[in-house]
Amino acid sequence: MSAPAPPTRPSEIVDVFLVAGEESGDRLGAALMRALRERTGGQVRFAGVGGREMAAEGVASLYPIADLPIIGFSAIPRRLPKILRLMRLTVKAVVAKRPHVLVVIDSPGFTQRIARRVRAADPTIAIVQYVSPSVWAWRPGRARAMRAYIDHVLALLPFEPAVHQRLRGPPCTYVGHPLVEQARNLRPNYEEARRRLAAPPVLLVLPGSRAGEIERLLGVFSDAVALVRDRLGSLEVVVATVPHLVDPVRTAMARWPLRARIVVESADKQAAFRTATVALAKSGTVTLELALAGVPMIAAYKVTALEYLAVGRGAAPAVRRHAGATPPGRGIFPA
């Protein structure tokens, strides 16, 4: 993390409107809210769209973010009317409130469309993108296009400001990753480290935080679990998920070849990270958490035939780089 600036107390209350489209963004948004409250001496007011963690920090979300998660191009058509309605609702709320700044967090397919519409409706509202899209992994032209509606990018990774400068993207500042502050909660103590090496091995399964990811990946993961069990025999399986997906996860796991334990709360997930022997994870932010925890992993992602034709085989290296949050050409684990 970069060194924190000294707290400053603004002459007026700063209004910040945040939009997070999924669970990982909700966690980042909550951490940002805490930091802003500390930096401003409490002279800040929040509104927006978020989940449980942002709600705990004071955001009354316009709607549940569980209504938002989609995966891939093929999921869009059947949910497009709802997505567009929520976009319009969000844009209308931002423009009506006229905050000092709009902060759109990750989920660029949703949040950047909101940013573009807000910029068109009221150019006086400053717009910040928290979490740079992976322009260093694929579709680098997005960086330059963002200049039209993003005033500043807050980057989680240290190489991203240089990437945006090279690609002529918006001004970009490396602010560090809040997960680094959680490292001590992810790393095992002596007894937990011994459990990692003991029998039976603990397989931690992380199938994602979107309904579409669960639908696509849990069947594949089930097959993988069966193969591991056949080769190793005894196996302890822990599946980490989010509250609004517990029921579909449990339904899918009813067909699994062995019983698995489901964990939902943050403390239980962190405990699972500390004792896991190995992990099978959906490519994304969670792979960075696994890296911090020192858990060997395989990252997976599944697309439809339409998406494969649209993106092509080039998507595989991009997933490999994005999953480990590493620059191009520096993949660090199998994907």
Image (cartoon, grey):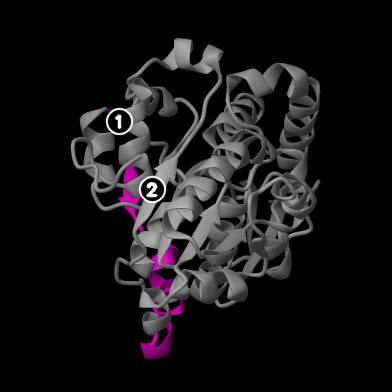
Comparing marks 1 and 2, which lies closer to the viewer?
Answer: 2
Horizontal and vertical percent for residue 194?
Answer: 37, 83
- Residue 284 higher or lower than 290, as above or below: above
The verdict on residue 78 being magenta is no
Instruction: Specify whether residue 52 is in view.
Output: yes
Q: Judge by depth and name the residue closer to the eye, 191 or 142.
A: 191
Find numbered disc 2 in the image and state the secondary structure of the residue it sits on: strand
Q: Dot 2 surroundings within 10 Å: few (below 14), some, or many (20 or more)?
A: some
Q: Quadrant of residue 240?
A: bottom right
Say the numbered circle drawn on residue 317. Answer: 1
Find numbered disc 1 in the image and state the secondary structure of the residue it sits on: helix
- Give the residue at x 70% y 50%: 253
The verdict on residue 175 being magenta is yes
Segment colored magenta: 168-192
Q: From mark 1 to mark 2, how far is it between C-alphas?
A: 14 Å
Q: Judge by depth and name the residue closer to the eye, 6 or 280.
A: 280
Horizontal and vertical percent for residue 322?
Answer: 36, 40
- In the picture of the structure, the residue carrying the numbered disc 2 is 298
Marks 1 and 2: CB-CB under 8 Å? no
Q: Dot 1 surroundings within 10 Å: few (below 14), some, or many (20 or more)?
A: some
Q: Is residue 198 left or right of residue 254?
A: left
